[in-house]
Structures are given as structure tokens and as C-alpha cells.
Image (cartoon, helix red, strand yellow):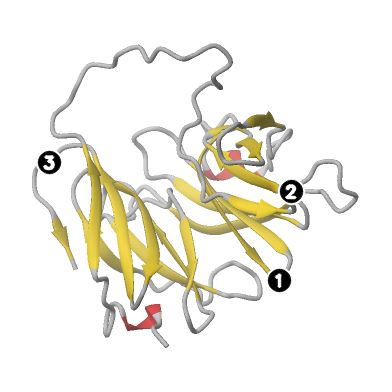
Amino acid sequence: MCSLSSFSLRWFVAMVAMATTLQAQPPREVRRQPGFPPRFHDPSTPVKEGDQWHVFSTGNGIQTRTSKDLTTWEEGPPVFKEMPKWHQEVVPTQRGHLWAPDIITHQGVHRLYYSVSSFGKNVSAIGLVTNRSLDPAHPDFKWKDEGIVIRSARNDPWNAIDPHVIVDDDRRHWMSFGSFWSGIQLIELDSATGKLLEEPAKLRQIAWNKTIEAPAILKQGDFYYLFWFIKFIDSIEFF
């Protein structure tokens, strides 16, 4: 058995794969074929229910799309039609544009994690919303706001956005997250609730670069691989 619990004191991430932009480039127009769907930013891990794949992305209320073949996608309804009140309590400038969702399914319940923040600020929170079905036509379809998983304030040296969740071989749930500030953090979640295992959260810094963000941890064979994105090559440190 290979457990993620061996990472920081005994933790080990075998490799780091990075998506990088070697130098800043001016934006260019992307020509889309007729019928090609509009931009779908920060897509989640795809999950399958029945014969449909579902994916979620940054957007107003969290955007959704479905596909039966992972090639042709149809737009679905947003996760939130009305935003939870706590969004503006945590981030007063928040107006419903939610970032970088990720989803896992545990014991028949879909857990969708997402970011509540504003550009260039670390006054942020990672929220959780759950559903027993991803099919809007199913009688069990109803998104339930589960509140805040973790939040960061202006004086914190880290930023609570860009969540990614993995379940290790010991069935322990781990969330990596972070953007800029002190880099990528790792926390353990309670598998029963999908929220923090302990309060206050025990943060483990697992990677840093001044422009690092959007982590994901995946397992292949005997090793866990940490992926991240950085915007400019400058200096890279990883553990």
C-alpha cells in the first residue's frame, strides 16, 4: 500500500510536471470552428455517471458540460443560480464568478470543490457543494451548499484557491491547493464530511514558485505525481 501520508515527514512526490510559458506573450485570437463551444477555463477532473461524462469550470455560478464520448460536449446549467450568502461575507467583491472547481465521488455523493476569490487577492475560500446526481432530470438532482472548507485572509502567507482532491491507497482524502504567495499547500480532509479533518488545518507546503498555481496530484504505479502551472520561468523549488 502506498499512502500520501508519507509525503512531508515521510512524504514523497516522485516527480513534478509543469506547464509553463517561457515568456509573456500578447494574447492572440483563437479561431474556432463553427459549432465549437466557447471558452471553458480551469476544467475539473471529468467524472462519469451512467453514460455521461461531466466536467465543471470557472465561470458565473460554475459552468458545466456533458459528453458521451469525451469529444462532443454540450453546455449544461450552472451549479449555482443563486450564490450562497457566505460568498460575499468572505469576499465582499464577489459577484458569482467562481474559479477552478474539482470534483470527486464518494459513497454515491458527488463533492464539488471550488474557489471564491478576487483577482490578485488572497482573501479567498474554498467551498464545497454536493449532489447525489449530476443529471438535472434525475429526482435526486439538487446541489447542496456545504459551506467553507478552508479560507485565507489578507495576513495569511497562502491563498485558498485552486483545489484538487485525491484519495490515497489508505482511503485518506487529501486536498492540494494554492496560487502565488507561499505556493502549493496540502491538507487532509475528513472522508466522512469532505471538509477539514482537523481545526485549525495542518498545512504542508509541498511546492513553491512565485507564480505557481493550479496543483493536481495523480497516482501512477507506485508513485504520486504533483503537477502545477507556472506563468514564467524564474526559479523553481520543489520537495
Sequence order check, earlier mark of 2 and 1: 1
Quadrant of the rendered structure where residue 195 is? bottom right
Q: CB of mark 1 within 8 Å of CB of mark 3?
A: no
Point out residue 186 in the picture as x, y percentages from the top left corner.
Answer: 37, 66
* Total count of labels: 3
Measure the alpha-carbon separation of dots 1 and 3: 41 Å
Q: Pick the residue in front: 153 or 102.
A: 102
Point out residue 18 in the picture as x, y percentages from the top left corner.
Answer: 24, 49
Q: Which residue is mark 3?
A: 233
Q: Secondary structure at mark 2?
A: loop
Measure the alpha-carbon separation of dots 2 and 3: 39 Å
Q: Which residue is mark 1?
A: 107
Looking at numbered disc 2 in the image, what kind of residue is underneath it? Leu
- Residue at coordinates 34% horizontally, 78% vertically from top-left? 222
Measure the alpha-carbon separation of dots 2 and 1: 14 Å
- Residue at coordinates 38% horizontally, 62% vertically from top-left? 217
- Residue at coordinates 38% horizontally, 82% vertically from top-left? 5
Q: Is residue 182 above or below residue 63?
A: below
Q: Which residue is mark 2?
A: 134
Q: Is residue 161 above or below residue 150?
A: above
Left or right of 63? Residue 133 is: right
Q: Which residue sits furthest bottom?
A: 1
- Residue at coordinates 25% horizontally, 54% vertically from top-left? 17
Sequence order check, earlier mark of 1 and 3: 1
